């Protein structure tokens, strides 16, 4: 071929190459997770290292996650962060992909107290990795409460009419069941209440309604309710306490004498994901000790990888109860699978609908 011919073809070759590079898309990993789990402070490093983009949507409750997955969104999202109340259902219903633990070298560092639980195991396979865990504590305005409230019963005090917020979630049902003593002697009974007990819980929650300013759906919503002085006490997340303190709000946090429920959040890959290899890399990155430390900086939840403590000051580790995990866990009744979840949801919906 003559030089003249080659020269005449050059612009065409360049155009083809440029067009090819333009059409090559950056892979995107779509997440459906709890607030705080896709913060740029730790996600950006993964994006840079893997030349990809993380696109996160946030869920307000476990039921919202289940509704989206069952409604056909399993292929829309690659990675999800179900809590321990629905993780088993997701693992056993074909909504998640089994994990190849040989591709997760940090899995062995995770707390055996968490990995030994049967929550995400089915058919001899593992469908999720424990990620973060924590309680549903009482959050309060320290200018209103000089001492930390010592009982959930304070929510029913007429003094706080219109000044209370509860989470629009079944954990509020569990909390009312605790107030009624249904966690004695076996805390796991909270997740398998009888019809008679659920009726009593419903009655107790209806009595609470005059005190409830609003039922919050997202963490940001609860933070705003405190900052606008619409509420002075609520059931919330440690993330709320951290965000409020960062904003200069006088927030306190406590677990009352009845103890509280709590959650173990897992990371799982959806069965319908078309980016399973990248998703597997993301799970490994998120359970590495260094990343776990960064996630706790944002959320103030307890990391599933205790080796994260090596990147913390002694005070930080103590604040997260990593100095005495066992005693702290005794105060938290971790969510479990709720066999009669539909009945619980029906009771909760009746409470919300009541005028």
Image: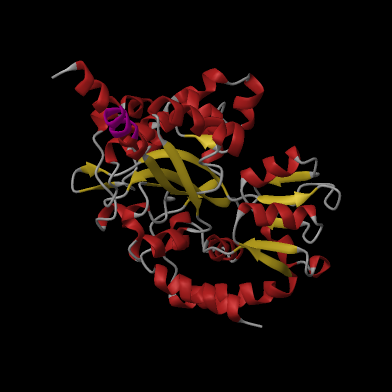
The residue positioned farthest toward the bottom in the image shown: 355
Instruction: Pinpoint residue 99: horizontal percent, then vertical percent.
Output: 26, 39
Magenta-colored stretch includes residue 13: yes
User: In the rendering, at what x and y percent does residue 235 appear?
Assistant: 65, 56
Q: In which quarter of the image is the N terminus?
A: top left
Colouring of the image? secondary structure
The majority secondary structure of the magenta stretch comes to helix
Residue 142 located within the stretch drawn in magenta: no
Task: Write the residue at 82% across / 57% down.
Answer: 229
Q: Give the range drawn in magenta.
A: 11-18
Task: In the rendered view, tell whether residue 180 sits above or below residue 289.
Answer: below
Q: Is residue 287 at least partly visible in the picture?
A: yes
Q: Residue at x 33, y 56 (%)?
A: 74
- Looking at this rendering, what residue extends furthest in the left direction? 1
Question: 196 or 266: nearer the eye?
Answer: 266
- How many numbered marks are there? 0
- Residue 73 vs residue 259: left or right? left
Quadrant in which the C terminus is drawn: bottom right
Q: In the picture, residue 280 is in which quadrant?
A: top left
Is residue 247 or residue 183 the one in the foreground? 247
Residue 282 drawn at (x, y percent): 38, 34
Horizontal side, residue 322 vs residue 53: left or right = right
Which residue is pictured at 51% across the width and 75% down the height?
A: 347
Give left or right: position of 113 versus 42.
left
349 shown above or below 188: below
Q: Can residue 305 be seen in this view?
A: no
Question: Where 292 sits versus 270, above or below?
Answer: above
């Amino acid at each position: 071929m003559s030089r003249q011919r080659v020269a005449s073809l050059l612009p065409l070759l360049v155009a083809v190459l440029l067009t090819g590079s333009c059409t090559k898309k950056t892979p995107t990993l779509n997440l459906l997770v709890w607030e705080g789990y896709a913060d740029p402070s730790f996600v950006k490093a993964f994006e840079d290292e893997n030349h990809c983009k993380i696109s996160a949507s946030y869920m307000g409750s476990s039921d919202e996650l289940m509704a989206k997955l069952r409604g056909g969104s399993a292929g829309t999202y690659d990675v999800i962060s179900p809590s321990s109340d629905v993780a088993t259902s997701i693992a056993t219903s074909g909504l998640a992909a089994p994990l190849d633990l040989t591709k997760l070298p940090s899995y062995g560092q995770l707390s055996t107290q968490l990995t030994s639980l049967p929550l995400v195991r089915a058919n001899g396979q593992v469908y999720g990795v424990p990620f973060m865990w924590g309680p549903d504590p009482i959050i309060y305005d320290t200018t209103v409460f000089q001492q930390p409230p010592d009982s959930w019963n304070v929510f029913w005090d007429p003094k706080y009419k219109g000044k209370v917020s509860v989470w629009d979630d079944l954990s509020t049902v569990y909390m009312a069941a605790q107030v009624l003593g249904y966690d004695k002697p076996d805390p796991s009974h909270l997740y398998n209440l009888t019809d008679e007990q659920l009726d009593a819980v419903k009655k107790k929650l209806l009595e609470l309604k005059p005190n409830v300013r609003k039922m919050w759906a997202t963490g940001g919503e609860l933070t705003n309710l405190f900052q606008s002085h619409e509420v002075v006490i609520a059931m919330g997340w440690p993330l709320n306490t951290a965000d409020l303190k960062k904003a200069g709000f006088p927030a306190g946090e406590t677990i009352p004498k009845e103890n509280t429920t709590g959650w173990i959040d897992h990371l799982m890959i959806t069965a319908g994901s078309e980016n399973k290899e990248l998703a597997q890399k993301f799970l490994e990155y998120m359970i590495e000790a260094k990343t776990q430390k960064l996630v706790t900086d944002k959320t103030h939840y307890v990391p599933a990888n205790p080796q994260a403590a090596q990147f913390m000051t002694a005070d930080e580790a103590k604040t997260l109860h990593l100095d005495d995990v066992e005693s702290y866990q005794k105060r938290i009744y971790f969510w479990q699978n709720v066999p009669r979840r539909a009945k619980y949801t029906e009771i909760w919906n009746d409470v919300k609908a009541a005028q």
